[in-house]
């Protein structure tokens, strides 16, 4: 038969049809595949179609066959299986730093990795989560800029912001620049995702210390031509241990704290500090553990949230600060 002008593209469209239209539960017969090709203006004979399917199979596409009243074909395994894609969808949905608009875009792209029918399962999950999402899509590109700076080993300059109340504005809560809009300049070394937020871990040459910054509070990020500082510091830096100790990435004095913990909360300790922490039996109902933390309001709030089942034993400074905070709370409610 005379070849149509689309014959050179036939294999490409055949692959497209098989990937989009078929899966383990949705196979196509040879006639159905010929009809699908026909919708693109491509005519094919049955023998030629079998040869083309064989070529795709040799190329690496997992062409499977099933027989009922007729032989049908479908794509079996893919680069990503459905359970893996569902995990990715869940991660996107639960991430505050990814806006709702960007979430929909990313999930739509993930749908393209499976058949149309399987993609509907991912689409349905878009509406499962009702969590607070970041409304500023710039954070998506901030993360990319910081990754590039780390890869190029360059310093970054930016403005750092904070939230304040402004009852004269319509929004009441506004983002304002810290230090009256002064430019921060640091050497980026790592990006961490903690408590559903992205943080930059960097070296401040002026202060000669490691600092961290919420990426969603960084504005006007620019990659400079200056080489990174702090290499010797980060060669011996334990980023995993750092993120365990910094509660919600709020600053404070780092300290080794000894806690008395009720046995029922061992899972809480593991979730926060990992299963490799060393615990010692204190009594039949409790144990002690030494952990590195930042002595910050967030740490004391964490201890308070666990009720009387956690007690700070040392250092004395931490004990005294916690007592002061408890006294302040009691005073606030007395009279």
Image (spheres, rainbow, N blue to C red):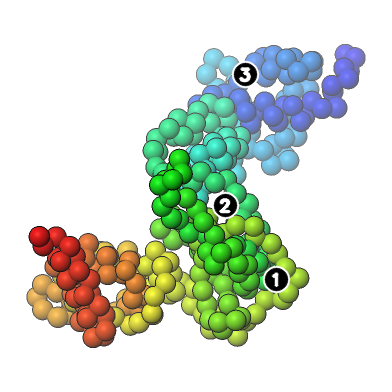
User: Residue 333: image x %, image y %?
Assistant: 14, 60
Which residue is rendered at x = 79% and y = 25% of the image?
10
Q: Secondary structure at mark 1?
A: strand
Q: Is disc 1 surrounded by few (<14), some (14 to 19) or many (20+) residues within 10 Å?
A: many
When asked about the image quadrant of residue 105, the answer is: top right
**What residue does disc 2 label?**
139
The image shows residue 110, relative to residue 146, as above or below, that is above
Q: Is residue 83 visible?
A: no
User: Residue 245 placed where, x, y %?
Assistant: 38, 73
Q: Residue at x 26, y 84 (%)?
A: 317
Q: Residue at x 43, y 32 (%)?
A: 127
Q: Position of residue 28 (x, y in %)?
A: 60, 21
In which quarter of the view is residue 252 placed?
Answer: bottom left
Identify the disc placed on residue 154: 1
In front: label 3 or label 2: 2
Circle 3 is placed at which residue position?
Answer: 29
Q: Is residue 179 visible?
A: yes
């Amino acid at each position: 038969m005379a070849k149509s002008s689309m014959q050179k593209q036939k294999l490409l469209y055949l692959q497209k049809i098989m990937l989009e239209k078929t899966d383990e539960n949705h196979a196509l017969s040879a006639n159905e595949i010929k009809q699908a090709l026909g919708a693109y203006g491509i005519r094919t004979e049955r023998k030629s179609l079998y040869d083309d399917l064989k070529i795709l199979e040799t190329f690496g596409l997992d062409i499977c066959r099933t027989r009922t009243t007729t032989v049908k074909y479908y794509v079996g395994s893919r680069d990503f299986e459905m359970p893996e894609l569902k995990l990715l969808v869940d991660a996107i949905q639960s991430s505050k730093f990814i806006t709702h608009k960007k979430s929909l875009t990313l999930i739509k792209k993930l749908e393209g990795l499976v058949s149309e029918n399987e993609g509907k399962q991912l689409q349905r999950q878009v509406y499962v989560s009702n969590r607070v999402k970041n409304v500023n899509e710039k954070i998506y590109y901030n993360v990319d800029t910081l990754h590039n700076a780390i890869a190029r080993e360059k310093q970054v300059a930016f403005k750092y912001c904070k939230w304040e109340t402004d009852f004269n504005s319509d929004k009441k809560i506004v983002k304002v620049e810290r230090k009256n809009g002064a430019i921060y300049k640091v050497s980026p070394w790592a990006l961490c995702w903690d408590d559903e937020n992205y943080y930059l871990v960097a070296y401040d040459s002026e202060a000669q210390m490691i600092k961290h910054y919420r990426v969603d509070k960084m504005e006007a990020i620019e990659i400079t031509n200056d080489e990174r500082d702090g290499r010797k510091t980060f060669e011996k830096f334990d980023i995993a241990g750092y993120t365990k100790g910094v509660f919600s990435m709020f600053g404070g004095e780092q300290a080794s704290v000894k806690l008395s913990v009720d046995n029922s909360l061992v899972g809480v300790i593991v979730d926060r500090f990992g299963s490799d922490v060393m615990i010692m039996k204190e009594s039949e109902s409790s144990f002690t553990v030494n952990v590195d933390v930042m002595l910050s309001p967030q740490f004391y709030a964490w201890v308070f949230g666990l009720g009387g089942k956690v007690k700070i034993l040392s250092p004395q400074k931490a004990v005294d600060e916690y007592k002061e905070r408890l006294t302040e709370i009691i005073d606030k409610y007395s009279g």
